[in-house]
Amino acid sequence: AQSVTQLDSQVPVFEEAPVELRCNYSSSVSVYLFWYVQYPNQGLQLLLKYLSGSTLVESINGFEAEFNKSQTSFHLRKPSVHISDTAEYFCAVSGDHNTDKLIFGTGTRLQVFP
Amino acid sequence: DGGITQSPKYLFRKEGQNVTLSCEQNLNHDAMYWYRQDPGQGLRLIYYSQIVNDFQKGDIAEGYSVSREKKESFPLTVTSAQKNPTAFYLCASSISTGSDEQYFGPGTRLTVT
């Protein structure tokens, strides 16, 4: 069975500071990995995804994540956060390639302070 | 303008009543999904459908029912058998099976008293 662990339920950080949101997964098969972002009372939006190839993937708004197979991790990083990055971030894994079923982590609330 | 719509945004019901949540997509996606979101628990899959007239139970299907009579529509009924129905419900769709991302609707917040 697959699972996703996001160890930090909340991450407070000051504006322009770097941030890392941690995600670890377990799976017996090859996986696809995703980070989604959710702003208050809204649906989820895809931030970035790893399917294959380069282990470092980037989003258009400065986030990046690195797939580390040996550590079964897919941590999300940003070198300098903005107030507008305040949101909930979900890591998800898909290992069943006959469907698009995703297993989500419990989420990390990123709070950026001025 | 392609996307997923969910209506209504807020829904209030009395305990013991069935309620149906709407989900419509105009993305021409084959697969659709229903998730339930509770604080601190992430998203949990209720039902999913890979093709019209076919659907499968997810991890927490008890007390819920769905139908998929049209490609663009996947309504979810929360029945009176669902013991804890108050939650935020999210509908999603994806192009087909494989590596495709899921696109999410804006959600419906259901409150049952």
Image (tube, rainbow, N blue to C red):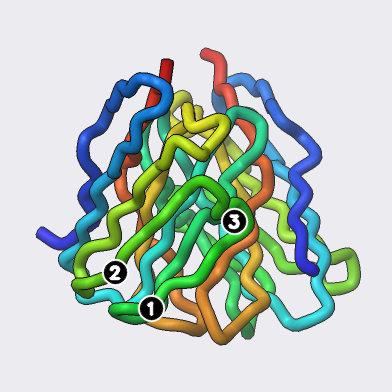
CB of mark 2 within 8 Å of CB of mark 3? no
Q: Which residue is mark 3?
A: A64
Residue B43 location (% of width, % of height): 57, 46
Asked which secondary structure carries label 3, the reply is: strand
Q: How many marks?
A: 3
Residue B56 higher or lower than A36, as above or below: below
Residue lying at 65% horizontally and 65% vertically, measured from the top left: A93
The residue tagged 2 is B68
A96 left or right of A87? right
**Is residue A71 shown above or below B111?**
below
- Name the spot of residue B58 as percent of width and height, x first: 57, 61
Q: The residue under label 1 is which amino acid type? A: Asp
Identify the residue under disc 1: B54
Please tell me which residue is depicted at 16% across the width and 66% down the height of the picture. Answer: B26
- Find the distance from the CA under tag 1 to the CA under tag 3: 37 Å
In front: label 2 or label 3: 2
User: Which numbered disc covers residue A82?
Assistant: none
Ranked by sequence position, the earlier of labels 2 and 1 is 1
x, y percentage for residue B4?
24, 55
Q: Amino acid at mark 3?
A: Glu
Of residue A101 and residue A11, the one placed in the foreground of this image is: A101
Q: Would you identify the image quadrant in which residue B55 lies?
A: bottom left
Above or below residue A102? Residue A110 is: above
Is the C-beta separation of discs 2 and 1 under 8 Å? yes
- Mark 2 Cα shell of 10 Å, populated few (<14), some (14-19), many (≥20): some
